[in-house]
Image (tube, rainbow, N blue to C red):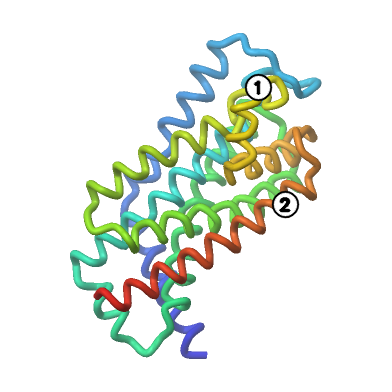
Amino acid sequence: MSELNAVWALVLREVKIYVREKERIIAILVSPLLFLFVMGRGLSGVSPAPGFDYQQFIFPGILCMVILFTAITYGLYIIWDKRLDFLKEVLAAPISRSTLFFGKALGGMAGAVVEAFILLLIGAFFILPIGPLQMLAALALSTLFAFLLAGIGLGLGARMKSMEGFGLVMSFLTWPMFFFSGALFDLTQAGPLLRWAALLDPFTYCVDLMRRVLLGWSVFPWPADLAAVLAFSALAAVWGVLSFGRLQQTR
């Protein structure tokens, strides 16, 4: 019970921090909205999904982009906690490192799901008809994707010593994950090297699964997408817990 209380306390702290930083909510949405309303409408791309235009085709990928940038960059707050000495206090508490990881991961997930919900509402009004069941399914997937990506970010943040170093690593990680995923194009028409890169990219399966929910179209069968996301999520959790165990040794 004490471990659950600790998780709840950590989640509550992260949610309060997120709510206080209202400008962060707006800042995260700027790039996705530019992709949707400038690139989506400005380019005359062909949509492989029958009955949908190019802007509607890229919407699921841009929705996942919001989750990607919100959740994975959440690892930056671990470095910030180190500087504030908050992390030392938590490490001294009688809780396991896995509890600390899951508390932080769930807190990071909350912000990503809120961002996804805002973009879903924008999309439902201006881009794509989204029914109530589709909205619920998309939010459920957003929660799963946020856990996967927050786990990657937290694992990296636990191993980094400076915000500058973390930002540099994120620049070389997030944008390739986004562009290789097929969020902006049809993977079936891509070259062999790009397809191989996409297969190794966990974000590919997030985008493909979200397209299946919102458009009824995907490159891979949805059970394969879901299995891949769950497998990568488990790996991210293991990576995160091991990284937080290392934090304990070097605090």
125 up-or-down from 235: above or below: above
- In the rendered structure, find residue 190 and report the number of the disc placed on it: 1
237 sits to left or right of 231: left
Q: Residues within 10 Å of mark 1 (few under 14, many from 20)?
A: few
- In the rendered structure, find residue 25 and report the number of the disc placed on it: none
Percent position of residue 96, x then y: 43, 83
Q: Residues within 10 Å of mark 2 (few under 14, many from 20)?
A: some
Question: Which type of secondary structure does the marked residue at label 2 adopt?
Answer: helix
Q: Residue at x 39, y 54 (%)?
A: 74
Q: Observer-nearest residue: 175 or 132? A: 175
Chain-order first, disc 1 or disc 2:
1
50 sits to left or right of 57: right
Quarter occupied by the C terminus: bottom left
Give the distance between the C-alpha atoms of the residues marked 1 and 2, in whole angstroms.
Answer: 22 Å
Q: Amino acid at mark 2?
A: Leu
Percent position of residue 103, x then y: 45, 71
198 up-or-down from 106: above or below: above
Percent position of residue 236, x then y: 53, 60
224 sits to left or right of 92: right
Q: Amino acid at mark 1?
A: Ala
Say whether residue 136 is visible: yes
Q: Residue at x 59, y 39 (%)?
A: 121
Q: Quadrant of residue 218?
A: top right
Say whether residue 19 is visible: no
Q: How many marks?
A: 2
Q: Tell me the residue that label 2 is attached to.
A: 226
Q: Residue at x 78, y 45 (%)?
A: 222
Q: Quadrant of residue 174?
A: top left
- Depth check, mark 1 against mark 2: the one in front is 1
